[in-house]
């Protein structure tokens, strides 16, 4: 019979949160703070990526170009333009930045002389009456847009770089280096003979030169209190970044909900999942700036082993059969509850320490690791069990709003969930009586239900959860100290 008392924990392991529909592909480039998404990201990745196009220098937006008004995104070395009326792969085209920058410099490439002669084979382009030789010709022929041709065809190279506009000549680039340079419609080739062979021909930063250099991203200051967190425990994360409009983050796989404190400081609470291995857990912060850029900061959070004990539970066939018969109802209940945990209300309703929601004997503590029928240790006891007589009062541990009040769930019996704001929830299971209604605001110490033995249990007790988002955290820690 004790096995039924433990079923709720096993069900938590069997039925994880529902998967969300995949969003449009997106990549944030922390070097510049801009994102690239959708078709432009696909095109950028498939046609040379960083060496050919460079980093993004602005958002995807409507721009006026020499070809008309188009949705485009500017990169260090190119401008990617969307042409939705064209069939792929021509639905994305490159700007003629070489020609545009020469015009901006008031250079008439047609009137310029023959320039320097580069060693090696040459190829003359009749349309512009220019030739490309040696390493520049090798580079031009070795790269091109992906248009479906075998190898790299001439039309693919032409689509990427365009025709040569100038002869090779020595020029000072945007980095202050004086190098042999040749301009093309969409690129500028630079010869760096002192570099390793793969990097002797580099592309000029035409996009950056057209737009001008961007201001530096602001620094991010980050601290976690405590800095070393025990498995299953809570930490307060404090971020300072000048000018941030929105701050968000993640601790491991769990999202963090940040709220403005005193400008320029933002604060979030995070929980370390019980089954997280001791060591370092990645902490990532993103701060959106007024100009549309995003500052990224990453740091490790040290996770300390809590020393939770492990139980192996053997489920008899009768119990497994019962679970199978009720599989759909159990999944529906899990979906109902899991839809609540990720919800974040901006107002913090609680203050100070939580209080114990019921009097009684602690019969099962938080964090005990569990294996079923000799399987992997992939579940744990998610809360604190308090045993007492049926009808014993259950009170709100802190001020909060009722977001679930169900009198008779299959697994959890009488169930209440309180939203305390800023991503913190508490859950109360197996109640014999539910004495609140959804939407009701309750104060600390207010009666919300009574201990019972409803649901999948064998004796009267209260199972009490504390969650930050989807992460269960040690309830007793919230009794011992105030968060935040």
Image (cartoon, rainbow, N blue to C red):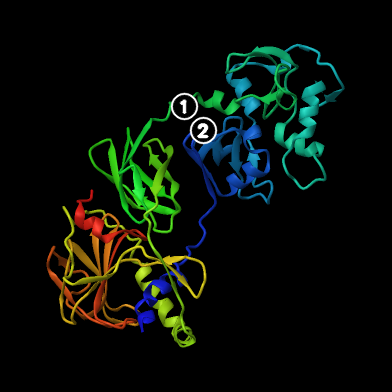
Residue 17: quarter of image: bottom left
Residue at image position (47%, 63%) is 20
Q: Position of residue 303 (x, y in %)?
A: 40, 48
The image's mark for residue 57 is 2
At numbered mark 1, what does the secondary structure look like: helix, strand or loop?
A: loop
User: In the rendered structure, which disc, 2 or 1, sits on the residue that comes first in sequence?
Assistant: 2
Left or right, 59 with respect to 142, comes to: left
Is residue 80 or residue 238 the one in the foreground? Answer: 238
Q: Is residue 129 visible?
A: no
Is residue 437 or residue 238 the one in the foreground? Answer: 238
Residue 290: quarter of image: top left
The answer to whether mark 2 and mark 1 are in CB contact below 8 A is yes
Q: Position of residue 287 (x, y in %)?
A: 38, 40
Q: Is residue 429 above or below residue 116?
A: below
Q: Is residue 304 visible?
A: yes
Q: Is residue 276 above or below residue 452?
A: above
């Amino acid at each position: 019979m004790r096995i039924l008392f433990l079923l709720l924990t096993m069900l938590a392991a069997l039925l994880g949160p529902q998967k969300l529909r995949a969003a449009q592909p997106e990549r944030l480039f922390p070097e510049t703070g801009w994102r690239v998404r959708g078709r432009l990201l696909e095109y950028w990745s498939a046609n040379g990526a960083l060496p050919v196009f460079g980093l993004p220098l602005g958002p995807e937006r409507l721009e006026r170009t020499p070809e008309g008004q188009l949705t485009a995104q500017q990169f260090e070395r190119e401008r990617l333009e969307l042409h939705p009326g064209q069939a792929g792969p021509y639905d994305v085209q490159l700007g003629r930045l070489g020609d545009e920058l020469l015009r901006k410099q008031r250079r008439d490439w047609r009137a310029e002389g023959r320039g320097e002669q580069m060693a090696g084979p040459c190829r003359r382009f009749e349309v512009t009456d220019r030739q490309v030789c040696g390493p520049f010709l090798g580079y031009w022929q070795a790269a091109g847009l992906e248009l479906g041709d075998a190898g790299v065809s001439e039309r693919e190279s032409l689509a990427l770089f365009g025709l040569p506009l100038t002869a090779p000549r020595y020029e000072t680039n945007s980095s202050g280096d004086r190098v042999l340079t040749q301009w093309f419609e969409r690129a500028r080739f630079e010869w760096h003979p002192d570099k390793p062979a793969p990097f002797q021909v580099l592309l000029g930063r035409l996009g950056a030169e057209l737009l001008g250099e961007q201001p530096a991203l602001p620094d991010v200051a980050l601290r976690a209190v405590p800095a070393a967190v025990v498995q299953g425990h809570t930490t307060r994360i404090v971020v300072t970044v000048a000018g941030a409009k929105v701050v968000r983050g993640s601790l491991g796989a769990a999202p963090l909900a940040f709220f403005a404190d005193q400008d320029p400081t933002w604060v979030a609470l995070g929980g370390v999942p019980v089954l997280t291995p001791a060591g370092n857990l990645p902490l990532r912060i993103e701060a959106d700036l007024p100009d549309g850029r995003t500052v990224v900061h990453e740091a490790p959070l040290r996770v300390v082993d809590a020393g939770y004990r492990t139980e192996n539970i053997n489920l008899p066939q009768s119990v497994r059969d019962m679970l199978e018969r009720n599989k759909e109802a159990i999944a529906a209940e899990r979906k109902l509850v899991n839809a609540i945990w990720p919800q974040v209300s901006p107002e913090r309703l609680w203050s100070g320490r939580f209080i114990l929601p019921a009097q009684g004997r602690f019969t099962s503590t938080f964090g005990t690791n569990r294996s079923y029928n000799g399987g992997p240790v992939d579940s744990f006891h998610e809360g604190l069990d308090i045993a007492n007589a049926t009808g014993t009062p259950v009170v709100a541990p802190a001020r909060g709003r009722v977001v679930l009040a169900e009198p008779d769930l299959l697994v959890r019996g009488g169930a209440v969930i309180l939203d305390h704001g800023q991503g913190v929830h508490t859950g109360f299971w197996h109640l014999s009586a539910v004495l609140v209604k959804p939407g009701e605001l309750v104060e600390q110490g207010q009666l919300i239900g009574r201990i019972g033995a409803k649901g999948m249990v064998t004796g009267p007790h209260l199972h009490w959860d504390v969650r930050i988002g989807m992460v269960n955290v040690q309830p007793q820690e919230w009794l011992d100290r105030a968060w935040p």
